[in-house]
Image: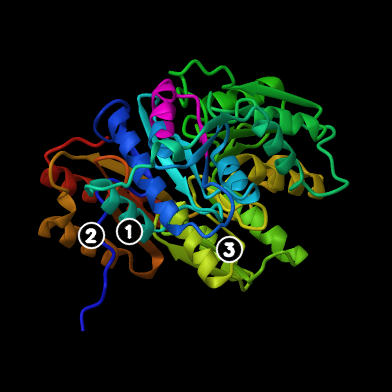
Amino acid sequence: MSQNKTPPRKFFGTDGVRGLANSDKMTPESVMRLGQAAGRYFRNQEKKIGSRPTVFIGKDTRLSGYMIEPALVAGFTSVGMDVRLCGPIPTSAVSILTRTLRADMGVMITASHNKYYDNGLKFFGPDGRKLSNSAEAEIEALLYGSDLRLAKPENLGRAKRYEDMQARYIEIAKATFPRRMRLTGLKIVLDCANGAAYHTAPDTLWELGAEAVIPIGVSPNGKNINLDCGSTHTELLSETVVKEGAHVGIALDGDADRLIMCDEKGRIIDGDQLLGLIGSGWHKKGQLSKPGIVATVMSNLGLERFFESQNLDFVRTDVGDRHVSARMRKDGYNLGGEQSGHILMTDFTPTGDGTISALQVLAEIIRQNKPASEVLSVFEPVPQTLKNVSYSGESPLASDAVQAAIKDAQSSFGSSGRVLVRASGTEPLIRVMAEGDDGTKVEKLTDDLVNVIKQQANSEPA
């Protein structure tokens, strides 16, 4: 008997829909049509009685948000959904508010850490979680269908702009910080990437009692989101921490769902170290719902060994916080994340939140009463390299030469290292990662793989 399979998704990628603004998937026409399809999908799922279906829409600070937002509004209202506009707000705020205010769905207009000229859409269900592959496939089926069942004139939706959503979110974020604990005495550099948290994150830290909050990346102009700042460009953060004599630095990305930090010496701390710190701290306090955490195939082997040394599970998933979230939900874990800085703590929020994650880290620094440099390095990472190869046309991964090179590299490592070669879900790139105890060997094997892939892709490393 044949089994039903989820049809392949063409419009959705690894994290919603993303593309060049005003082109292909991100034209007003495409976005409106997608809003109609998503609205119809959630109307078909509707179970509430006596209330109109509602969608919350947030956005980051990209110039194209002014174009995409009204296109979405037109799409949703045309199928009879009421729209609540939140303005610039972190992705997790849309997730949280969708759930707590009992909306039928939420949408965040963002391309996360990408440059300003890209934009995208992240969709959330009424539980505040990102949509499953099957739900996205059903929306695509409606998108390409011929009948979206537009609402009758008397049943069109209405749109309303909410002015208090940032304040609501700040109070929610503050409530996740341990009671009777304050940030008193801490001098913090905060890089908001000129993105969605440029207002909420500084206010949250200040209201929790920080001695000083030194903000950078808080002057969005529509084109400077993630530009030489934020979690993917941390040089400015490190320089500012050292220059200002700050105790710690915090960097968010464009939609504020990622967190990268640095200590008082300006040394960058990635998501693996933050997961190690939070996980070990929660373990000691009995806050882990299960004895372990969920990470991805990209997390450093040193993190895996660190948790195993504490007799804690270390579960790996495919890359993407959505995969981490799904595994956490399936197996009952309440902590997971990615090396890139997505930290998922389901006790607080259904999706990643850079500000709330930072508060957990700051709480641990206060508890230990030590410099950040002594607190934030919880394990010794093994040497790891990550290189990208760009390509056009068909992915070179399918070639026999590339597959053979990958197999040979892994065999060469044996049990002392790992090789991971994968296609990016958002860009035409092949990502080559290798790690192991012998750093020289790691570098050589990575370069060898890159050269083979370049030959097959007829491209230069990105």
- Identity, as a three-letter code, of the amino acid under mark 1: Val
Residue at disc 2, secondary structure? helix
Q: Which quadrant would residue 407 be assigned to in this image?
A: bottom left
Indicate which disc, 1 or 3, sits on the residue closer to the N terminus: 3
Q: Residue at x 18, y 40 (%)?
A: 391
Observer-nearest of 180 and 161: 161
- Image position of 145 (left or right of 132): left
The answer to whether 173 is drawn above or below residue 302 in the figure is above
Q: Position of residue 101 (x, y in %)?
A: 64, 47
Q: Residue at x 35, y 53 (%)?
A: 136
- Identity, as a three-letter code, of the amino acid under mark 2: Ile
Q: Is residue 210 visible?
A: yes
Indicate which disc, 3 or 2, sits on the residue closer to the N terminus: 3
The answer to whether 384 is drawn above or below residue 294 in the figure is above
Q: Residue at x 51, y 39 (%)?
A: 82
Observer-nearest of 297 and 14: 14
